[in-house]
Amino acid sequence: MKKRRLLALTLSVLLTFTACSGAIEQSYTAYADSQTVQVSAETASAPTILESVFDKGKANAKGNAWIDVSHVSDGYVAVAAISDKRLKFQVICGEIKYNYDMKNDGTPSIFPLQSGNGEYKFRIMKNTSEKKYAEIHSVVCAVTLKDQFQPFLRPSAYVNYNKDSKCVAKAVELTKSCKTDLEKIKAIYDFVCNTVKYDHQKAKTVQSGYLPTPDETMTTGKGICFDYASLAASMLRSQGIPTKVIFGYVSPNGLYHAWNMFYTKESGWVTVSYQLNPQNWTRMDLTFSANGADGNFIGDGGNYKDVYMY
């Protein structure tokens, strides 16, 4: 517990705001429970950039729609389709359901299997009228992950990077002298805090279905909450540190917001929360969602409600 409290005092970052609300929220239809749990599995001790790929040759095809489940044990599903209509991709596991916007030009998309082990149903849906969609292809698949960290160690549509990304190279530079994961996390979050500013104009105009480009966020030095969370997750995952992008609500005003949760052997799962200073970005204390380390803004974490994770 002493080590955790020390981490809470030394690691912190930026960002809570009112403008992140509805524009980013997509048409998810069920609550996804992202409980903060302590686990004993080993995490990667050396930087290993794990890839996410679409293998069309192994994909289950129907017409111009492909669902590749050849890597579900690695924590993700890959899909592609060609259509003259808007497309959605639906991931169902038990009572948990995620609906995603999907490209209709055949470009592959990667989505995480954040619900863990179990039977999944994957559905590609085509727009038929207004907000109605009809299934054009589906696959049912039993998923057994190599370990529970797999969905949070790889690139996806929400955490978009690869071995050649600028943010990955920057993470290597920032962490080259770090000896522990905690030191790496601090170095990366300090970098994000000091180099990225909140983009008020973008927050006013961002459209539903928006997905960040971490390299762009790093290059422009501007972003909204989703950009911050995606950039941090990309850099940390590239260093072998399991990291989630969490969407949820912050009390007392019910702000829809994005933040991160990362895992280390020393601390288990830890939530990183953000607050915006009226004058500039300032760092706030971390809060351990499971253990309630003190924090000036979020207290024991009770005013943060995790809803979706990626």
Image (cartoon, helix red, strand yellow):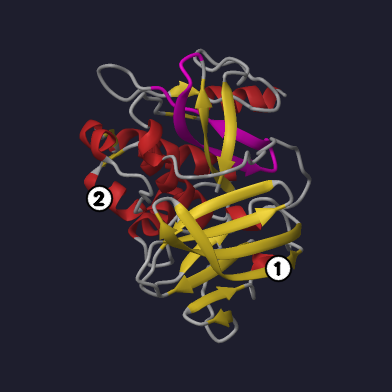
Q: Position of residue 53 (x, y in %)?
A: 52, 73
Residue for point 64% across, 19% down: 293
Question: Farthest bottom residue?
Answer: 57
> What range of the chain is rendered magenta?
252-275
Instruction: Give the numbered dot on residue 219.
Output: 2
Q: Are marks 1 and 2 in contact (CB under 8 Å)?
A: no
Is 157 covered by the magenta stretch? no
Instruction: Give the numbered dot on residue 111.
Output: none
Q: Secondary structure at mark 2?
A: helix
Q: Secondary structure at mark 1?
A: strand
Q: CA distance from mark 1 to mark 2?
A: 40 Å
- Residue tagged by mark 1? 140
Label 1 vs label 2, nearer the camera = 1
Q: Is residue 176 visible?
A: no
Q: Is residue 69 visible?
A: yes
Residue for point 55% across, 81% down: 62
Depth check, front residue: 50 or 91 = 91
Amino acid type for the residue under numbered disc 1: Val
Q: Quadrant of the N terminus?
A: top right
User: Badge 2: few (under 14), some or many (20 or more) residues near its Cα, within 10 Å?
Assistant: few
Q: Is residue 247 left or right of residue 121?
A: left
- Look at the magenta stretch and give its main secondary structure: strand
